[in-house]
Amino acid sequence: MPFSLLRSRPEARRTATLVGGALLPEGEARRVYLGGQLILVAHVEGRFYAISALCTHWPELIDPASLHGCEVRCPVHWATFDVRTGKATGGPTRKGVAVFPVRVVGEDLLIEFPE
Ligand code: FES
C-alpha cells in the first residue's frame, strides 16, 4: 500500500481575527463573540490568551472583570480557571475550559479554533 494512503491529515483549524485585540491592557480581560463562540481574551504576563467563556460547571459566563493574576472566576459558584492553560483551579468543577492558540499580528489577535 502506498504511503500516501496512510498519511494522517493535520487537524483542521480556522482562524478568526480580533481587530485591535492586542491593545488590551496588561492585567485585563474581555469577553467577546468570535469564531462562532463566546471566548474570554486575557493579557497576562506579557502574553495574550483565549479560553472559552463558558463555565464547565453549568453553562454560565465566566466574568472577565474577575481576572486576578492568571485566574478568572465564574460568578455563580466561584469556579476559577487559569487563562494560560484553561485548567480549573478551584470551585465545584475539575473540568477545564477550551484554550485557543493566539498570535499577535500588529494590533490584532489571530485566534485559532478547531473546525
Ligand atoms: S456555574 Fe460556574 S461555578 Fe457553577
Image (cartoon, rainbow, N blue to C red):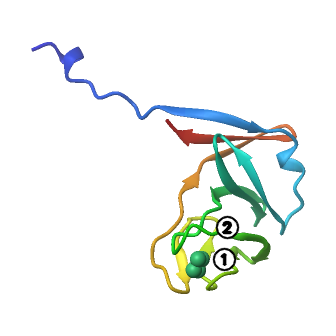
Q: Which amino acid is tagged 2? A: Leu
Q: Helix, strand, or loop for circle 1?
A: loop
Which numbered disc covers residue 74? Answer: 1
Q: In this view, does 32 lie to the left or right of 7?
A: right
Residue 59 appears left or right of 67: left
SS of the residue under disc 2: loop
The residue lying at 61 percent from left, 63 percent from top is 54
Instruction: Name above or below for residue 6 compared with residue 65.
Output: above
Please name the residue that numbered disc 2 is placed on.
61
Q: Position of residue 104 (x, y in %)?
A: 76, 42
Image location (x, y in percent) of residue 43: 78, 61
Quarter of the image with the N terminus is top left
The 10 Å Cα crowd at callout 1, few under 14, some 14 to 19, many 20 or more, is many
Labels 1 and 2 touching (C-beta < 8 A): yes
Residue 12 picture location, percent across and down:
46, 31
Picture residue at 84% right of the left edge, 66% below the top: 28
Is the residue marked 1 within 8 Å of ligand 1, measured from its CB?
yes
At horizontal 51% and vertical 75% (from top left) the residue drawn is 57
The three-letter code of the residue at mark 1 reads Cys
